[in-house]
Image: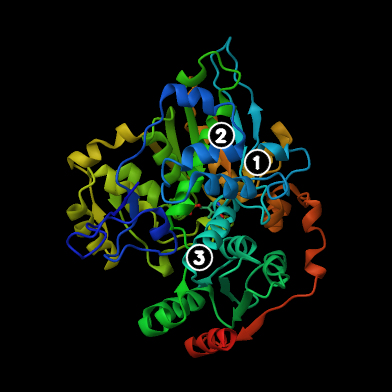
């Protein structure tokens, strides 16, 4: 499988072959500023679907990912996947969840054949080491990085900024990995005690926590400034693991298959039965994987995109207008991992929507990159939207509190604030002929404050994470300074 850029040729060289999976694994954007996508979406046959239904998570991941990865020998890929998707790695979640399932499905309302009611379920994606769905892809990325770097005798220094989820997920995935160092910037004293403890209690030699006396945006700006210093970037082999990384999107495709099989295991329709997925969305990475699973032929009836008050994407699906917000227009909400001003993976979907025409994408993203909006309403592309199965809605803080209460009182399940956004919108957009599977993107233990506000009690904390606030922490505190960060990287590499 070769990869192309949403903005045109992946390489300026006229006859250069398009890159393969391993080549784009360590990079971020394509050289032309676009995002990588496979040249075509591999299709799954009905007999494959039948066979895949019986597979373990790791074997299913192999079946799916082998269609996208042909430059890692199959046996090696199989080994990497078997090492990644284990009950040990994904057994940190709810005490009553079967860890062997990796992503267990929890019915809230079972399907009812007699009444034709499709049922409502949670797909648990948050049982990994940092209790958020990002572990599903990031843990694989850690193993893939280590493998590919060893093959190429290369090293990488991952530089990132985090306000919580991504940074900790990256650190837990990369800790102890040969050839990889992580330098993670976070806003000093602006994360919860739990988030700080999760990151700063790691003592691995290759993990460097740097707290910046400023806001998340200051940390982000430092990362951009370092990456824009091309000489420094090349000399110190600076890389990133942000949400546009293709391998992360690809790894997420797997659990749509897993969720589909689990939701239809008791249905007479088998693989003819359609399923709807509701996805709490921010940068469009998670739901982009659902779109790809659907393009591969998985019978996904609906992709329900849920936003919080930051409703850039909901607005697009409702009106055809994509209007990136400024940071001043971006709300700080109680589902913070969805607080985005624009959605970095959205370009991938629009590429498909406009018939995979890179010239159109270049024009549209010239606007976006200049901070302006674009409007597809009235275009033939926007008229095709229903073909892609997307519907959308948004949710507010009051909705989250009400949904957390409803889930607890009705089904006895405590959910986090992001999952609440998904459940709220998914419940509104249910249709009786298919099950609605809401993706659980984090566990409530990560967002104690809002859970206490909604329910007047604290969420259960998985045993592995009890008392982590009391562990010794390792973090270097610096002023908002690009030079200070460069100095730390130089120091560690000499
Ligand atoms: C990252 C994240 C999201 C948003 O996912 P995208 O792939 O950015 O759309 C939702 N919920 C949680 C808990 C997250 O960490």
201 horizontally vs 381: left or right: right
Above or below — where is 162 with respect to 173?
below
Q: Residue 341 in the image: x percent, y percent?
A: 41, 61
Residue 19: x, y in percent?
32, 56
Q: Secondary structure at mark 3?
A: helix
Of labels 3 and 1, the one closer to you? 3
Label 2 sits on a secondary structure element that is: helix
- Which of the two labelled residues, at mark 2 and mark 3, occupies the earlier sequence position? 3
Residue 52 in the image, given as x and y percentages of width and height? 53, 29
Look at 46% across and 58% down and name the residue there: 243
Q: Residues within 10 Å of mark 2 (few under 14, many from 20)?
A: many
Give the alpha-carbon distance from disc 3 to disc 1, as whole Å: 27 Å
Which residue in the protein does label 3 denote?
A: 149
Image quarter of residue 246: bottom left
| Mark 2 C-beta to ligand 1 under 8 Å | no
Q: Nearer the viewer, mark 2 or mark 3?
A: 3
Alpha carbon separation for disc pair 1 and 2: 9 Å
Earlier-in-chain disc, 3 versus 1: 1
Would you name the residue on which mark 1 appears?
Answer: 102
User: Can you say whether 248 is above or below 426 in the image?
Assistant: below
The Cα atoms of the two marked residues, 2 and 3, are separated by 30 Å
Circle 3: is it few (<14), some (14-19), or many (20+) Cα within 10 Å?
A: some
Q: Earlier in the sequence, mark 1 or mark 2?
A: 1
User: Quick check: marks 3 and 1 in contact, CB under 8 Å?
Assistant: no
Secondary structure at badge 1 equals loop
How many numbered badges does the structure rendering display?
3
Quadrant of the drawing holding the C terminus: bottom right
**Disc 1 packing (10 Å; few <14; some 14–19; many ≥20):** many
Cβ–Cβ below 8 Å for labels 1 and 2? yes
What residue is disc 2 on?
Answer: 258
């Amino acid at each position: 499988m070769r990869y192309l850029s949403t903005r045109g040729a992946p390489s300026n060289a006229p006859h250069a072959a398009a890159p393969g999976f391993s080549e784009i694994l360590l990079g971020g954007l394509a050289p032309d500023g676009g995002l990588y996508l496979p040249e075509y979406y591999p299709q799954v046959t009905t007999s494959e679907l039948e066979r895949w239904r019986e597979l373990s998570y790791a074997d299913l991941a192999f079946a799916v990912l082998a269609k996208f990865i042909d430059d890692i020998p199959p046996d090696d890929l199989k080994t990497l996947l078997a090492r990644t998707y284990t009950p040990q790695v994904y057994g940190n979640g709810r005490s009553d969840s079967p860890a062997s399932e990796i992503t267990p499905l929890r019915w809230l309302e079972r399907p009812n054949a007699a009444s034709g009611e499709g049922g409502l379920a949670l797909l648990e994606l948050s049982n990994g080491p940092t209790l958020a769905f990002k572990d599903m892809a990031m843990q694989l990325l850690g193993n893939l990085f280590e493998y590919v770097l060893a093959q190429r005798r290369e090293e990488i220094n991952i530089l990132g900024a985090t306000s919580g989820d991504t940074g900790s997920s990256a650190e837990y995935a990369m800790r102890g990995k040969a050839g990889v160092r992580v330098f993670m910037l976070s806003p000093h004293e602006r994360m919860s005690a739990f988030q700080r403890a999760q990151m700063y209690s790691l003592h691995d030699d290759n993990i460097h926590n740097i707290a910046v006396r400023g806001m998340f945006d200051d940390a982000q700006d430092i990362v951009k400034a370092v990456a824009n210093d091309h000489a420094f970037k090349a000399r110190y082999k600076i890389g990133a693991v942000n949400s546009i990384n293709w391998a992360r999107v690809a790894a997420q495709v797997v659990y749509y298959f897993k969720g589909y099989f689990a939701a239809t295991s008791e249905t007479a329709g088998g693989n003819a039965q359609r399923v709807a997925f509701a996805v709490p969305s921010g940068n469009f990475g998670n739901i982009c994987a659902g779109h790809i699973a659907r393009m591969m032929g998985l019978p996904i009836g609906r992709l329900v995109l849920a936003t919080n008050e930051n409703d850039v994407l909901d607005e697009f699906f409702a009106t055809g207008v994509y209007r990136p917000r400024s940071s001043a227009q971006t709300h700080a909400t109680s589902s913070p991992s969805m607080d985005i001003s624009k959605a970095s993976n959205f370009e991938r979907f629009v590429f498909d929507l406009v018939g995979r025409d890179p010239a159109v994408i270049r024009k549209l993203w010239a606007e976006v990159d200049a901070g302006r909006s674009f409007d597809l309403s009235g275009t033939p592309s926007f008229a095709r939207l229903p073909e892609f199965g997307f519907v959308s809605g948004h949710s507010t803080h009051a909705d989250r509190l009400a949904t957390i209460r409803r889930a607890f009182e009705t089904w006895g399940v405590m959910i986090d604030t992001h999952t609440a956004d998904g459940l709220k919108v998914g419940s509104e957009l249910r249709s009786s002929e298919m099950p609605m599977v809401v993706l659980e993107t984090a566990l409530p233990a990560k967002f104690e404050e809002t859970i206490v506000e909604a329910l007047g009690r604290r969420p259960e904390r998985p045993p592995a994470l009890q008392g982590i606030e009391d562990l010794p922490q390792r973090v270097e505190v610096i002023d908002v300074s690009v030079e200070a960060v460069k100095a730390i990287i130089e120091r560690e590499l000499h």
